C-alpha cells in the first residue's frame, strides 16, 4: 500500500483544481451533460504536473466514464495523475466508486481521499462502513444538487433524489465529515457558484463543505470562503485562462 502524506490546507481552505477524465482525455461537461463535452487535453499527467508547478496542494480527479458506468474505467489515467502529483500533493478521486473494493483500490494506489456519491445516497450505511474502515479524513461524499434535491446520476434529467439538507444530515450522522456540493445547473458554465445553496449547507454545521460548480474568479473563491466553505473545486475557468491558478492559490494562502 502506498502511503502519501496529506498536505495541510492554509487557514483550513482547500483550492482543488479539477481533472475530469473521459476516454483518457481531460474534459469538462456543461451541467453534467455528457453530450456537452469540451476537451482540454490528451495527457492528464501533464495537466497534473502543471497544477503542481503552480503550487496546488490538492487535485480533484473525476473518472466520468466510471461515474456513468458504475465501475472504475480510467484506472491507468488516475494512476498517472497520482504519480505526477508526487508526494506532498494530495489527490481526491471520484467516479465509479460503488463498493468498498473500489475505494480501497484508489486509496491503496495513493489517493488521499475517495469521493463517493450515488452509492452513498442510495445506502448511507455504505458511507458509514467506509468511514469505519478508512477514517473520515479519507472519505468524502459528493452531493450533486438539482432543484434542492441531492441526486444520484446527476447527469440524468429527472433522476430521483432526496432533499439535500436531509442527505447531508443523514450522512453526517453516519460519520461523513467532508461534502462536495455541486449545483448542477451551474456546473461548467462559469456563471458563479450558488451561494444560497452553499450557505444553507454550511449553516447546517455538520461537516466541511467544498464548493463545486461555477467557481470562476478570485471573487468567487473569496465569496465561498467567506461563507465558511472549506474549499472550492475549480476546473473550466483554469483551462480557459479566466483564472490564474497560481494567483488563486496565493490568495487562499493569505
Image (cartoon, grey):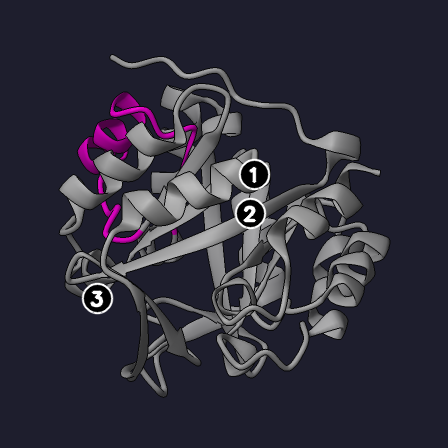
What residue did someone put label 2 on? 16
Kindly indicate the quadrant of the structure image that contains residue 250.
Answer: top right
Circle nearer the N terminus (2, 3):
2
Compared across the picture, whether 153 is left or right of 193 comes to left
Q: Is residue 46 visible?
A: yes
Q: Which image quarter is the N terminus in?
A: top left
* Residue in the picture at 32% in, 24% down: 110
Mark toward the viewer: 2 or 1: 1
The stretch of residues the image draws in magenta is 95-116
Secondary structure under the numbered disc 3 in the rendered image: helix
Instruction: Determine if the magenta segment contains residue 125.
Output: no
Rendering coords of residue 252 (x, y %): 76, 44
Rendering coords of residue 29 (x, y %): 37, 75
What residue did someone put label 1 on? 56
What residue did someone put label 3 on? 68
Instruction: Determine if the magenta segment contains residue 112.
Output: yes
Work out whether residue 111 or residue 171 is closer to the camera in this orientation and state it: 111
Tags 2 and 1 touching, CB below 8 Å = yes
Secondary structure under the numbered disc 1 in the rendered image: loop
Compared across the picture, whether 157 is left or right of 137 comes to left
Amino acid at each position: 500500500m502506498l502511503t502519501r502524506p496529506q498536505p495541510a490546507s492554509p487557514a483550513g481552505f482547500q483550492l482543488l483544481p479539477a481533472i475530469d477524465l473521459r476516454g483518457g482525455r481531460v474534459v469538462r461537461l456543461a451541467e453534467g451533460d455528457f453530450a456537452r463535452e469540451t476537451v482540454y487535453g490528451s495527457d492528464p499527467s501533464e495537466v497534473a504536473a502543471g497544477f503542481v508547478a503552480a503550487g496546488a496542494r490538492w487535485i480533484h480527479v473525476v473518472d466520468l466514464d466510471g461515474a456513468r458506468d458504475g465501475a472504475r474505467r480510467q484506472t491507468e489515467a488516475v494512476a498517472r495523475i497520482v504519480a505526477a502529483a508526487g508526494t506532498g500533493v494530495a489527490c481526491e478521486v471520484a467516479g465509479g466508486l460503488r463498493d468498498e473494493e473500489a475505494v480501497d483500490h484508489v486509496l491503496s494506489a495513493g489517493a488521499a481521499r475517495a469521493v463517493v456519491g450515488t452509492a452513498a445516497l442510495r445506502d448511507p450505511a455504505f458511507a458509514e462502513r467506509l468511514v469505519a474502515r478508512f477514517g473520515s479524513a479519507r472519505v468524502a461524499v459528493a452531493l450533486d444538487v438539482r432543484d434542492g434535491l441531492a441526486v444520484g446520476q446527476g447527469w440524468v434529467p429527472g433522476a430521483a433524489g432526496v432533499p439535500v439538507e436531509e442527505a447531508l444530515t443523514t450522512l453526517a450522522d453516519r460519520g461523513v465529515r467532508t461534502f462536495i456540493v455541486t449545483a448542477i445547473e451551474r456546473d461548467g458554465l462559469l456563471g458563479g457558484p450558488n451561494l444560497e445553496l452553499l450557505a444553507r449547507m454550511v449553516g447546517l454545521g455538520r461537516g466541511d463543505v467544498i464548493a463545486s460548480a461555477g467557481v470562476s474568479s478570485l471573487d468567487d473563491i473569496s465569496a465561498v470562503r467567506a461563507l465558511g466553505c472549506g474549499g472550492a473545486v475549480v476546473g473550466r475557468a483554469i483551462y480557459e485562462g479566466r483564472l490564474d491558478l497560481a494567483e488563486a492559490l496565493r490568495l487562499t494562502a493569505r
